[in-house]
Image (cartoon, rainbow, N blue to C red):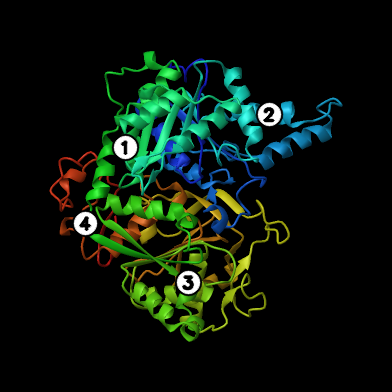
Amino acid sequence: MNKGGGMKKMKYVVVTGGVVSGLGKGVTASSIGVLLKACGFRVTSIKIDPYLNTDAGTMSPFEHGEVFVLDDGGEVDLDLGNYERFLDIKLTRDNNITTGKIYQAVIDKERRGDYLGKTVQVVPHITDAIQEWIERVAMIPVDGQPGPADVCVIELGGTIGDIESMPFTEALGQFSYRVGAGNFCLVHVSLVPVLSAVGEQKTKPTQHSVRGLRSLGLTPSILACRSTLALEENAKQKLSQFCHVPAENIITLYDVPNIWHLPLLLRDQKAHEAILGVLNLLGFVQISREPNLEEWTSRAELCDMLLEPVRIAIVGKYTGLSDSYLSLLKALLHASVSLRKKLVVDWIPASDLEDETAKENSDVYKAAWKLLKGSDGVLVPGGFGDRGVEGKILAAKYARENRIPFLGICLGMQIAVIEFARSILGLQDANSTEFDPDTKNPCVIFMPEGSKTHLGGTMRLGSRRTYFQVMDCKSAKLYGNRSFIDERHRHRYEVNPDMVSRLEDAGLSFTGKDETGQRMEIVELPNHPYYIGAQFHPEFKSRPGKPSALFLGLIAAAACDQLDSSLHAHKIPNGTAKKISLYQNGNAAKFAKIPTDGIYSNCNGVHA
C-alpha cells in the first residue's frame, strides 16, 4: 500500500458458501471488509448474484428480500446495503453482477460482431466477461478518495454446486490464476451442525462442500464455519486434515447477540492475519498493533446493554419477511442505539387493521390494533400494489389524531397525503391513481416519465436533490439547517402538484420539493409532535455511526418522555456524548468515543 492511491496490484478476497444457503455470507464479507479497513486498507466490494434477472428491481420482496437502491439508481441485492453500511462506502450498479447482466453484455457484443464470427460459448466468452467485469469494477473508487482501493471483497451468492453459479465458479477458478498467487484469497463459509441426539459437531458436510469446491477449480484459503458454539479443537483438526486448510486459518462464526460483533469475532480469531498472510500483505501493517475497532466495539457492546425500550410499529405489506424491510430495520437500530434506546419493532400487516379483517377474523383485527395503540411511534414504509393500503391510511389517521410520532416513507408519505385529504378536506374518494384510476380527487398521480408496460428500471431512481422551502421546520433542523439534501428515490407515483395549494391551505406543509418545485419530497404537520412523510428512502443512506436524520427524529420523538432533561435545550455536537447524561447504565466512560449526531428532543417535537 502506498500513499499514491493504493498498492500496485489489486488484491481479491472471494467469499463463497457451502452446504446450505442463508449462512450469512453477506455479513461475513462485510465484516472482512471492516477488519481490513481497520488495518488501514481501502476496501471495495462486489456481489455476484447467479440469477438471470438483470437486476433486483422486478423481484418480489418475499422472493429475495428488499431491493436496495444506490446513488446511481442501481436496484441491487440487499447485501450491497450491508457493504455500504459496514464500510461506509457508495457503490455503483456495476458492483452487483448478475447472470442476466453478463449474458446481456456478451449477447450485445455478439450482435455487434465483436467476436469476429467465432462460436460464442460459456467458456471462454462468458467466463472472460465475468473476469473482465470484476477487474474493471474493482478499480472504481467507492470511498470518496481518488484512485482504486487496495482490496476488493467479492461475494458469490448461492451455494457451491448450484447449476446457476457454475459459470462464476469456473470464472473465479481461472481468475485465481489470472491475478496470481498472493493476490487471491478464498474464504469458504460453511455449516458445522450439531445433531441434538449426539451433541457432537459434525464436519462431514463441510468436508463434502470443500471437496466440491476443489473439484470446480477453487481451493479455500480460509474456512469460516457457522455453528451455534465455537469449534471444538478436535473438529478443527479434522477439518484441517481433510480440507487441507491450516488449523489457524479455520474460524468459527458462532452465534452472537448482534451482527456488529462479527468483525470483532473475526479479529479475536486473527482472521485478519490469515487473510493478510494469504495476500502477502503482512509487511504493510504492524501486526503487533490490533486493528482499530474501538468505536465499533463500543457500539456493539452498547447495543447489547440497552434496556429502555422504544416501540415502533411498522405497518406494511411484507411483514412476513423481515428482510423485506432490512434497511428500515437497520436505520431504526442506528437511530435507537445513537439515542441509547432498545429498539422493539411491532410488525403489523396493514390489511389486519382494515374493517374487512374485523368481519373475517376479529381476533387478528383486535391484536393488530392493540399493537398499534401500544406503540411509541408508527412507521409506514414504501410498497407497491393496493393490498393493505386502507390499513396504512387508518394507521396514519390514528397517528395524526392521537399525536403519535409518525414517519411515512415513499408510499407512506403518499398515504399521509391521501388521509389528510379525506379527513381534513372532506374528499372521501381522495386516492392515488395507482389504486383508483377513476378517482375524482387524485392526490397521487403517475409520473409522466414512467412506463406502465416495462417495470424494470423505469421508476424515478437514485440520488435526487431536495430543497427545503422553509427552514423553520423539523425536517430542515434534523438535517442540520442545510438548504438542500441528496437522498435516494424509488417510485413511479408522486403527489399531484395541482392539489398542493388546497392541502397547504388546510394545514399540511410541503417543506421539501425538487428543483422544479413541482415534485413534493417532504411533508409535515407543523402542529404535531412528529408527523413527517418523505418521498425518498432515507434508510438507504443510514450508517451505524451516522444515523439517518428522519429516523433519529422518529426515535427521539417516540421516546420523548424518557429522554434526559439535559437534552431539552442543547444540541449534542459530535464527539461530546460523554457530556450528556444519557447513560443510564453507568458506562459513560466506556462509550464516550461513540459520536452522537446533532439532535435533541422534547415532547413538543424535535429541535436543533
Q: CA distance from mark 2 to mark 3?
A: 46 Å
Where is residue 579 shown, x and y percent of the image?
Answer: 16, 45
Judging from the image, what secondary structure is the residue with disc 4 in? loop
Marks 2 and 1: which is nearer the front? 1
Instruction: Decide: few, some or many residues near mark 2? Use Cα within 10 Å; few <14, some 14-19, many ≥20.
Output: many
> Where the C terminus falls, by quadrant?
bottom left
Marks 2 and 3: which is nearer the front? 2
* Nearer-the-camera pick, 377 or 47: 47
Instruction: Decide: few, some or many residues near mark 4? Use Cα within 10 Å; few <14, some 14-19, many ≥20.
Output: few
Q: CA distance from mark 3 to mark 4?
A: 29 Å
Residue hosting label 3: 350
Would residue 154 be visible to someone looking at this image? Answer: no
Instruction: Decide: few, some or many residues near mark 3? Use Cα within 10 Å; few <14, some 14-19, many ≥20.
Output: many
Which residue is drawn at the image coordinates 51% and 19% (left, top)? 183
Q: Amino acid at mark 4?
A: Leu
Marks 2 and 4: which is nearer the front? 2
Residue hosting label 1: 230
The answer to whether mark 4 and mark 1 are in CB contact below 8 A is: no
Marks 3 and 1: which is nearer the front? 1
Using the image, determine if residue 326 lies above or below residue 46. below
Where is residue 474 shown, x and y percent of the image?
Answer: 35, 60
Judging from the image, what secondary structure is the residue with disc 1 in? loop
Residue hosting label 4: 307
Using the image, determine if residue 116 lies above or below residue 182. below
Residue hosting label 2: 127
